[in-house]
Amino acid sequence: MSIETISTNAYLTYQLAEDYFSVNVGKVVEIVEVPKITKVPQSPDYMSGVINLRGSVLPVVDTRIKFGFPSKENDLDTCIVVLEITINETDQILVGALVDKVLDVLEIEPEKINPSPSLGSKYKSEFIIGMGEIGEGDFIMILDIDKVFSTEELSILTETKK
């Protein structure tokens, strides 16, 4: 008798403006309320600043700006998703992603993940693993969070922590 395992993936879904995104929960460390963010002089426009996360300095990125949306004031739904970004085979960095609203954790089976459309997308296709089918004709973008930040951006974020 053989035991068949069902392979599914869990994804944290969140909202930016009117768009919905998801990231593999394996990359999510925690979700925190937005504390006081300290600005860092001469940092890129998408860099909100840094926060103190239990004694560690955490760089915070405004994902609205990173993805080309206009910035907005934080409200009760705004939060920071702490993500573990892989820099290379041996190194990771924690980054806080400021999002408008965390929605849910969804299980999306691999066969329900479709390739990202290459035409007409306002997002770089290399950022997107695929489009997860979450209902009758409903899809959500699944981000490859390790590719959202370039090597240069990650070095800026790493320097910010020091």
Image (cartoon, helix red, strand yellow):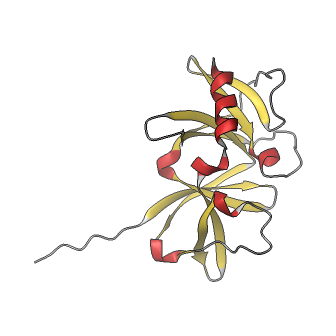
- Relative to 69, 4 lies left or right: left
Quarter of the picture containing the C terminus is top right
Name above or below for residue 119 compared with residue 146.
Answer: below
**Residue located farthest toward the left when viewing the structure as drawn:** 1
Left/right of residue 98 with respect to residue 58 in the rendered view:
right
Percent of width and height locating residue 69: 85, 52
Q: Residue at x 65, y 73 (%)?
A: 139
- Classify residue 90 by image quadrant: top left
Provide residue 76's location: percent of width, then percent of height.
76, 41
Which residue is drawn at the image coordinates 78% and 46% (left, top)? 66
Does residue 16 sit above or below 40 in this rendering?
A: below
Vertical position of residue 160 compared to residue 10: above or below: above
Considering depth in this image, is 91 or 50 the residue closer to the camera?
91
Image check: 90 left or right of 2? Answer: right
Say which residue appears at 51% left-offset and 46% top-offset: 27
Q: Position of residue 44 (x, y in %)?
A: 81, 33
Q: Quadrant of the N terminus?
A: bottom left
**38 lies left or right of 116:** right
Q: Residue at x 71, y 50 (%)?
A: 101
